[in-house]
């Protein structure tokens, strides 16, 4: 489960603090083992018979074929089974799929390459600089909540009154975004997330209806998110 500390003071003006949680490094994947051709250790290689150049040696007469043991044409019955196995081609190792590119950490400055909507649904309440410092988006319990841009999770928990299960993401030195009233958080503090990544499930924590309360803060001050989000 995500960390549930209080928000750090630097998280866009939200009044609480919490120690950052370190994300455990991912375990290194074991190298793949590929199948190859292995000779049977129980078999003894048949030694090659050297040809003689001594003309005085009388060639041995060929032995008559044993009745009832036909020999297939073109097959040398004296051929070594080990030599045949060694001649078999070794299967090519499978090609590992390329890993997806990692999400990018916040970049200095104030430019965000692209904003995207944090959830599907209808905006049921708009922004007001005095009484409502974000927007509310309705929907169904469990609907996905998305990061609106690349960034780092600087807060994930319930330590800020009035927001329920809350996530705060820092996008750069200028912008942060906040996602409140979730039922389930899917990221931890210090996680690096990408634009469009699912970070939570929509719910009603800290309120009486299922909705996402969403805010964007510019240099710590709330602004109308609809001025930055693309038109639906």
Image: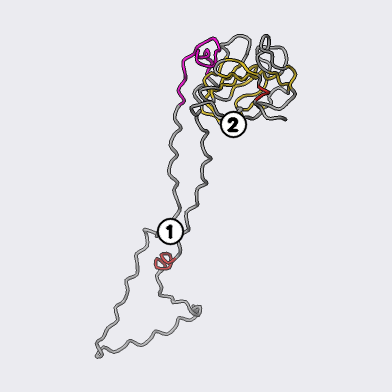
Q: How many marks?
A: 2
Q: Are the residues tagged 1 and 2 within 8 Å (C-beta)? A: no
**Which residue sits at x=44%, y=34%?**
27
Residue underneath mark 1: 37
Residue 182 seen by the camera: no
In this rendering, position of residue 142 left or right of residue 221: right
* Residue under the image location 45 percent in, 65 percent down: 88
When the figure is inspected, residue 209 is found, relative to residue 192, above or below; the finding is: above
* Mark 2 lies on residue: 195
Quadrant containing the C terminus in the rendered view? top right
For residue 128, side relative to residue 177 (left or right): right
117 or 183: nearer the eye? 117
Vertical arrangement, residue 76 with respect to residue 113, above or below = below
Based on the displayed image, in which of its 4 quarters is residue 143 positioned? top right
Point out residue 92 in the picture as x, y percentages from the top left corner: 47, 57
Question: Relative to 6, does residue 83 appear above or below in the rendering?
Answer: below
Compare marks 1 and 2 and give the one earlier in the sequence.
1
Taking depth in this image into account, of 15 and 182 the one nearest to the observer is: 15
Q: Is residue 19 magenta?
A: yes
Specify start and end residues of the magenta stretch as a single range.
Answer: 3-23
142 above or below 65?
A: above
| Magenta segment main secondary structure | loop
Q: Is residue 26 left or right of residue 53?
A: right
Q: Give the mark toward the camera: 1 or 2.
A: 2
Point out which mark residue 222 bears. none
Quadrant placement of the N terminus: top right
Q: Left or right: 98 with respect to 135?
A: left
């Amino acid at each position: 489960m995500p960390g549930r500390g209080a928000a750090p003071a630097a998280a866009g003006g939200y009044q609480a603090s919490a120690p950052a949680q370190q994300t455990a490094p991912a375990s290194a994947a074991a190298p793949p083992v590929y199948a190859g051709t292995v000779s049977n250790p129980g078999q003894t290689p048949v030694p090659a018979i050297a040809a003689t150049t001594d003309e005085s040696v009388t060639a041995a007469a060929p032995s008559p074929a044993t009745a009832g043991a036909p020999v297939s044409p073109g097959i040398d019955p004296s051929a070594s089974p080990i030599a045949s196995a060694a001649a078999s081609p070794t299967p090519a190792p499978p090609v590992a799929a390329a890993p997806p590119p990692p999400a990018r950490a916040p970049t200095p400055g104030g430019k965000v390459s692209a904003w995207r909507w944090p959830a599907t649904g209808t905006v049921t309440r708009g922004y007001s600089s005095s009484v409502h410092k974000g927007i509310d988006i309705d929907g169904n319990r469990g609907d996905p909540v998305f990061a609106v841009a690349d960034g780092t999770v600087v807060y994930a928990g319930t330590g800020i009154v009035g927001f329920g299960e809350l996530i705060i993401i820092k996008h750069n030195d200028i912008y942060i975004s906040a996602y409140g009233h979730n039922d389930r958080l899917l990221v931890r503090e210090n996680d690096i997330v990408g634009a469009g990544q699912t970070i939570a499930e929509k719910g009603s924590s800290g309120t009486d209806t299922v909705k996402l309360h969403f805010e964007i803060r510019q240099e710590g001050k709330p602004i109308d998110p609809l001025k930055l989000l693309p038109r639906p």
